Amino acid sequence: MIGFWTLFYKELLRFWKVAFQTVAAPVLTALLYLLIFGHVLEDHVLVHGVRYTSFLIPGLVMMQVLQNAFANSSSSLIQAKITGSIVFVLLPPIPYSAFFAAYVLAAMVRGLMVGVGVLLATLWFAELRVVAPLWILVFALLSGALFGALGMIAGIWVEKFDQLAAFQNFLIMPLTMLSGVFYSIYTLPTFWQRLSHYNPVFYMIDGFRYGFFGVSDVAPEFSLGVVFACFAVVTALTLNLLKRGWKLRT
Amino acid sequence: MAAAVSIVDVVKNFGSLQALAGVSLEIAEGEFFGLLGPNGAGKTTLISSLAGLARPDSGSLKVLGHDVIKDFRQARRLLGMVPQELVFDPFFNVRETLQIQSGYFGIRKNDDWIDEILENLDLTSKANVNMRRLSGGMKRRVLVAQALVHKPPVIVLDEPTAGVDVELRQGLWQFVRRLNNEGHTIILTTHYLEEAEALCGRIALMKQGRVIALDTTANLMAAYPGASLEEVFVRTMNQ
């Protein structure tokens, strides 16, 4: 267990030492989104009976939780692979399950820290209800873990920073941006509505938002089931890659 | 008593390149063993396989009787490795680096031993300096320190003095000799053959993934009276 805690602590320390870049910057980005979209749409849009700026906040929080959880594990692994310092975690007797847990937990912590930061910063601009805090917590934790694990797969798979950037820009960003962060999918044309149901991030944001307003596009229990199933699949895949040492051990 | 290292018929291919073509050798506890050969001979692949960084296609490797794949946790606990590349984690200072490495090996409060290693490697004054700020030689010393934090009985040094100044080399060898005298098994790869000649009791010469000579340093040199190890090396490789 000491190996696991040390790796977890190291991963925390790694992003905390550059917190301005890893925590403060994403909070500012989310704040800018809120200011711009809120300013433009606040008086024109009401979603599920909720004013637009209030509706937007949970989406922005979850988007940053996901993107930062992903960024934490993926950037840590790719950086260690490129610099060669990955040997320091491959030489010790750390079981692959502990390796997985440490990276994912650290990714969750960073994601949640940014999420809480966004929430606190945006509260100045809109009133936010909390109807079901447990749903908020469950979706934040599970989604952060899922994207932390996804970040591990990306970090293991890619060999260069530009490949990781492609993974982020062509997969993670579209998945998060087109998931209902900025809108309810029922405002979309039928085709895009249906397509959105194949995006797992939609369920994360919809379920998370349910915790605030008590309304959602689909039932939160169903969303939870989808997110949990995705987490189980991604976890199984990541553990398998780690067990085989794929792209880590030659 | 189990050998410090037991390697049996290890084969490793990278695509069409055969890096190890059935290597077998045994290293006894307490030996100072040299693994020599030209670039591409398979030394680093063999060492990486021993440390679990590479996975052999066939054959077995054991550290003090523990298989490096089936019983990897115990095998890795018993092995300390100094990698060839000058690698470091730029987020941490020297002490943090060593504390973290101790934790990876399951050791929590290790500061007394860390202080001793720092002193022996002349790093005490750099303990709180970020790794990025260290010179190449200093970084190399930290790599050695990292390999020693868990007091492994078997220590593998993969070209530890490459690009290192004379003073550091002498200090490093003095410390490694002391560790060897205390019972640690040392496995060394180096291109500085005079170092191997002075330090190693037994030497394996590798070429194209095979061990082509394996004997005590004295016996290897006796085959070519009056020759230095470098001359012995060149002649053996050209045979």
Image: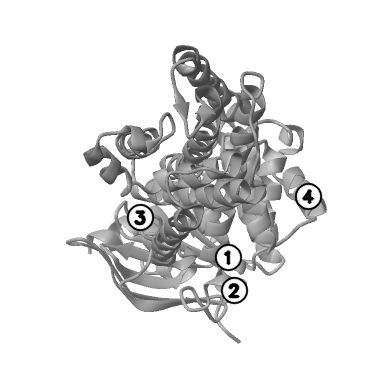
Q: Quadrant of the C terminus of chain B?
A: bottom left
Q: Looking at the rendered structure, which numbered label has been put on residue A247?
A: 3
Marker disc for residue B116: 4
Q: Residue at x 65, y 44 (%)?
A: B97
Give the camera-side residue of A22 and B6. Answer: A22
Residue at label 1?
A93
Residue B74: which numbered mark, if any? Answer: 2
Chain of the residue under the numbered disc 1 shown in the image: A
For disc 2, the chain is B
The amino acid type, in three-letter code, at marker 2 is Gln
The nearer-to-camera label among 4 and 2 is: 2
Q: Amino acid at mark 1?
A: Pro
Q: CA distance from mark 2 to mark 1?
A: 7 Å
Q: Are marks 4 and 3 in contact (CB under 8 Å)?
A: no
Judged from the image, the secondary structure of the residue bearing numbered disc 2 is helix
Display coloring:
one colour
